[in-house]
Image: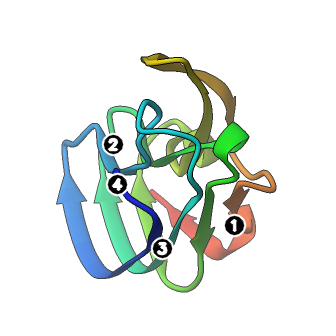
Amino acid sequence: HNGYGHVNINGFYAENFGKLYRSCGTCGNIKRTVALNHVWGYNPKVSLVTVNANNGDVATFTDDIHVHTSKGANAVCQTTSSTNGKEPKVTSKGPSKNCVFNKNKIEFY
């Protein structure tokens, strides 16, 4: 997601993937948001979502989220810190103010 604004992901299945959604970490200091509802992720290599904390990006997981993984909440959402045109570095994994979800409401397999 390179531009400004909001993305809704509703009713989506992904299998053997890196990230279902990633906010751009080298596209300037602009805020991006994403909401996920009715999403199934089977074997995410990284996470369902990656957002940039220092840009104020926020991912909100609402209802009916299923993740088949051995990584637990770390496979749901991670935050990165964008760095002057270089690839962003991971700063946290799991629930946070930028990755809004309740681990108890996500079904893990």
Number of numbered labels in the structure image: 4
Kindly identify the amino acid type of the residue bearing the numbered disc 3. Ile
Task: Tell me the quarter of the picture where residue 81 sits.
Answer: top right
The residue wearing badge 2 is: 44
Kindly identify the amino acid type of the residue bearing the numbered disc 1. Phe
Secondary structure under the numbered disc 3 in the rendered image: strand
**Gap in angstroms between the C-alphas marked 3 and 4:** 21 Å
Circles 1 and 3 in contact, beta carbons < 8 Å? yes
**Gap in angstroms between the C-alphas marked 3 and 2:** 13 Å
Task: Tell me the quarter of the picture where residue 55 sits.
Answer: top right
Q: Quadrant of the C terminus?
A: bottom left
Residue depicted at x 18% and y 52%: 15
Quick check: 49 above or below 44? below
For marks 1 and 3, the one nearer the N-term is 3
Kindly identify the amino acid type of the residue bearing the numbered disc 4. His
**Gap in angstroms between the C-alphas marked 4 and 2:** 18 Å
- The residue closer to the viewer here, 45 or 99, is 99
Residue depicted at x 81% and y 56%: 97
Label 4 crowd (10 A; few <14 / some 14-19 / many >=20): some
The answer to whether 97 appears left or right of 101 in the picture is right
The residue wearing badge 3 is: 65
Residue 7 picture location, percent across and down: 40, 74
Q: Which numbered dot is residue 1?
A: 4
The residue wearing badge 1 is: 101
Residue 28 picture location, percent across and down: 49, 39
